[in-house]
Image (spheres, rainbow, N blue to C red):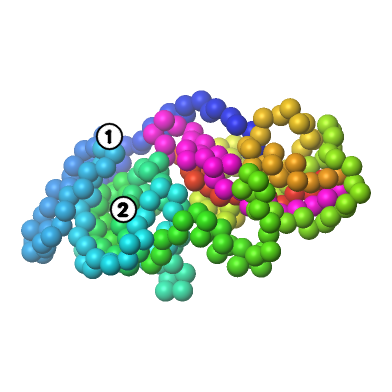
Amino acid sequence: MLKKITYQLIVLSMLVIVCSCAKEPIQYEDPQKIILSNENDIKNYITQKGLVNYERIAKNDYFFYLKKNTTSSDSTQEYDGSTVTISFKVYDLNGKLLDSTKTNEPYTYVSNKFFVPRIANLLFDLRKGDKVSILCPYIYMSFDGDITPKRIEAEILNVQSEEEAINTYLVRTNNTDMLVSNAGVRYKITKKLPNAPSLTTGSSIDYLGEFLRPTQFLTYDYSINQYVYKKTLIFDKNVMRYDPKESLISGFTEALNLLKLGEEGTFVIPYSLAYGEKGISLNDMKTDYTMPPYSTLVFTIKTY
């Protein structure tokens, strides 16, 4: 996981789906036809309800309709790499509640232009405090294969830079006493051996890799021999042999340079020293990631 790897393209095909939103079931093979049908349903919904001030926004071959219910005076705007916290409710066009955040458990994600499509794309370029209503095709929000359009009511609760998100993490985990290396890695040596020798080729590196918060990403499930989406804090756990010539992400190399043999430490690595703005994707559409873009990583490392 730590190595810089180029993945071959994996072609994903879509099964024939039965559209449940029409009066008579219609079978589609082309998802674009479903999206077109969704847009017709959305236009009819807007007309029947007498809705106004909805703006049609086109992004990455998809679209949605957005209405700002309140416009925040806060200047904190969402941007690539920012950590965004939202609350939302998702309905079908008949008014049935399909999903929502809990009052005390809002949804947090790292904003980026690479995940397409998903709910975060619907909220891009908004500001902290904005409240919006959104009408969108199924491609942004689907439940158990459902392919009908959705209505979303959302509020942007908070927008943080990576620096602010890291500081929030340090406070939450009681690690505000971490030092900062010249390269920008935050670190704490939890087991220090001043007289220990430096790491040498073949030294054992036992590490645990985590995100700042539970994150959804694509991981390989060996029990069923396929990739599955999983939301978890831990993304990697392994033991490796130290090789100073091995090409690793620069932040992890920096962490190893801060340790001596037998020492242990915790390290917070900015995305610029990890997998960067692009992460690791399994396909050219940038929809399936084994490492999401703009991921700030936390490593707990033991050496022996």
Is residue 20 toward the left or the right of residue 160 in the image? left
Which residue sits at x=17%, y=50%? 56
Q: Nearer the viewer, residue 187 or 232?
A: 187
User: Which is more foreground, mark 1 or mark 2?
Assistant: 2
Q: Is residue 268 magenta?
A: yes
Locate residue 40, reporting x and y percent: 14, 48
Q: Earlier in the sequence, mark 1 or mark 2?
A: 1
Locate residue 226, reporting x and y percent: 55, 37
For the question of whether residue 258 can be seen, the reply is: yes
Locate residue 276, reporting x and y percent: 52, 40
The image shows residue 105, relative to residue 234, as above or below, that is: below
From which residue to which does the magenta span run? 262-287
Single out the residue that lies furthest toward the front: 182
Is residue 142 toward the left or the right of residue 41 in the image? right
Amino acid on which the number 1 mark rests in the picture: Glu
Q: Nearer the viewer, residue 119 or 228?
A: 119
Quadrant in which residue 73 is drawn: bottom left
Q: Is residue 269 magenta?
A: yes
| Residue on which disc 1 sits | 29
| Residue on which disc 2 sits | 125
Which residue sits at x=47%, y=40%? 277
Amino acid on which the number 2 mark rests in the picture: Asp
